[in-house]
Each structure stands twice: as C-alpha cells, then as structure tokens.
Amino acid sequence: MASPTVTATGTKSSVPSSTSSVTILAANPGRKDATIHNNSTATLYLDLSGGTASATSFTIKIFADGYYELPRNPWGVYTGLITGIWSSANGNAQVTEFK
C-alpha cells in the first residue's frame, strides 16, 4: 500500500460556466488531490474519463453551490483530464489542485 502524500502546494483557478463542455482541470500526472466548488445556481456535470462532459454522459453531478473532492485510493487520485458542462451559464467553478 502506498504511503499518504503530503503537499503544501495548491493552485487555485476559476473556470467560467459554459453550456458547452470545457476543461476544468488539464491532465496532470503530478496531481495529489483536487477540489471543485460549483459557484453557480446551475448544475455542473463533471466528466472524469478524459472525454467530453454532457448532461447525459458524466461522472459526477454537482448541484448549485456544491463541492466535490477527488476520491483517494491507495494508489493516489485521478490525474487525467476533467471536463465540465453546466445546465445554464452563470457563475463558475472554483478549483484548487494540489501538487
């Protein structure tokens, strides 16, 4: 089993909401963790497959003012591309990626 990784480096970003699929986080093999806050009144659909997010093809649904943290397992966290799409364009996603 892998040892827990401690990190002191967090990079914040803000992704404007869109009704077209957009990149929330680029793939990063050095990612240790990430958090995403849906700072919008609309639902945010996240895709964690490296593909295009849609309201019918997604991994996680974050409701208005909701929060998501990448799940940890003994081998680390998902380091691939994360895309998102909102049910309507208002607000943004507040993202912090830990490296």
Image: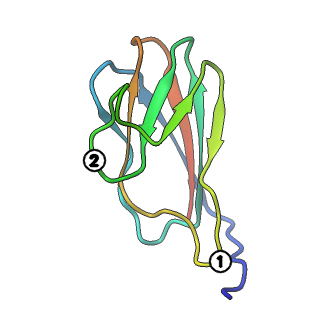
Q: Earlier in the sequence, mark 1 or mark 2?
A: 2
Amino acid at dot 2: Gly
Q: Which residue is mark 2?
A: 51
Identify the secondary structure beneath mark 2.
loop
Q: Nearer the viewer, residue 94 or 86?
A: 86
Residue under numbered circle 1: 74
Few, some or many C-alpha atoms within 10 Å of disc 2 (few <14, some 14-19, many ≥20)?
some
Label 1, secondary structure: give it. loop
In the rendered image, which quarter is residue 80 located in?
bottom left
Work out whether 83 lies above or below 3: above
Seen at 61% across and 18% down, the residue is 64
Q: Residue 67: where, in percent of width, then height?
A: 66, 34
* Rendering coords of residue 77 (x, y %): 56, 65
**Residue at 65 percent of width and 77 percent of height:** 74
Q: Quadrant of the C terminus?
A: bottom right
Q: Where does residue 52 sit, x and y in percent of width and height?
A: 27, 40
Q: Which is more toward the observer, 18 or 63?
A: 63
Q: Is residue 73 above or below residue 45?
A: below
